[in-house]
Amino acid sequence: MRELRQQCGLTIVQAAKLAERGSGSLQRLESGATDRVQLRDIEELCRIYDAPDYVEPLKGLAQQANAKSWWHEYGDLIPAGFNVYVGLESAAERLTIYRPDMVSGLFQTPEYARALDHTYFSYESPEAVERRVQLRIRRQSLILRKRKPADARLVIDEAALRRVVGG
């Protein structure tokens, strides 16, 4: 939506005024920071931006965004804003991850993940730690799916591979 607005040469304030919405609401819509995307907003903005070809594809995306996804059951464990990445991972064809200090969550064994979580989340119950581990396993299964698995590449320092985790 932001690209369409910018192609029209409109500021966020101008577009919001034309759509009879607050600029904050439009900004949240453009950044994906809204809980629910209204289909009528997409229709109206596409009309303002003279982009009729984008109405149906954007409405389809909005309907997907409005549907609860599998990771919502882990919502209390996923940091704010990270759920976007979790959603994108499951649809990704290629992943390139730079994490020199430790093995990325997508590549952690359950034992490694438990050891890390016992250290970093020592205040949490064993059940919460286990849910964190299950979240990682679920994320892994989605990128390692049987049909068209993601091409995943990880850049990591050798020291991270040799580091003993969990004592």
Image (cartoon, rainbow, N blue to C red):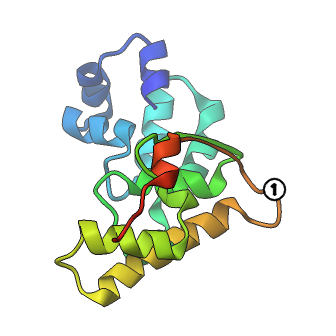
Secondary structure, mark 1, is loop
Horizontally, is 146 left or right of 163 in the view? right
Specify the amino acid type for callout 1: Lys
Question: What residue is shown at x 40% (from left), y 53% (from top)?
Answer: 37
Residue lying at the far right of the rendered structure: 147
The answer to whether residue 75 is visible is no
Residue lying at the far top of the rendered structure: 9
> Which corner quadrant holds the C terminus?
bottom left
Question: What residue is shown at x 30% (from left), y 17% (from top)?
Answer: 11
Question: What residue is shown at x 37% (from left), y 53% (from top)?
Answer: 82
Horizontally, is 55 left or right of 125 in the view? right
How packed mark 1 is, by other alpha carbons closer than 10 Å (few <14, some 14-19, many 20 or more), is few
Question: What residue is shown at x 35% (from left), y 42% (from top)?
Answer: 29
Quarter assignment of residue 22: top left
* Vertical order, 93 against 63 (above or below): above
Quarter assignment of residue 48: top left
Give the percent coordinates (x, y) of residue 119.
27, 69
Q: Which residue is mark 1?
A: 148
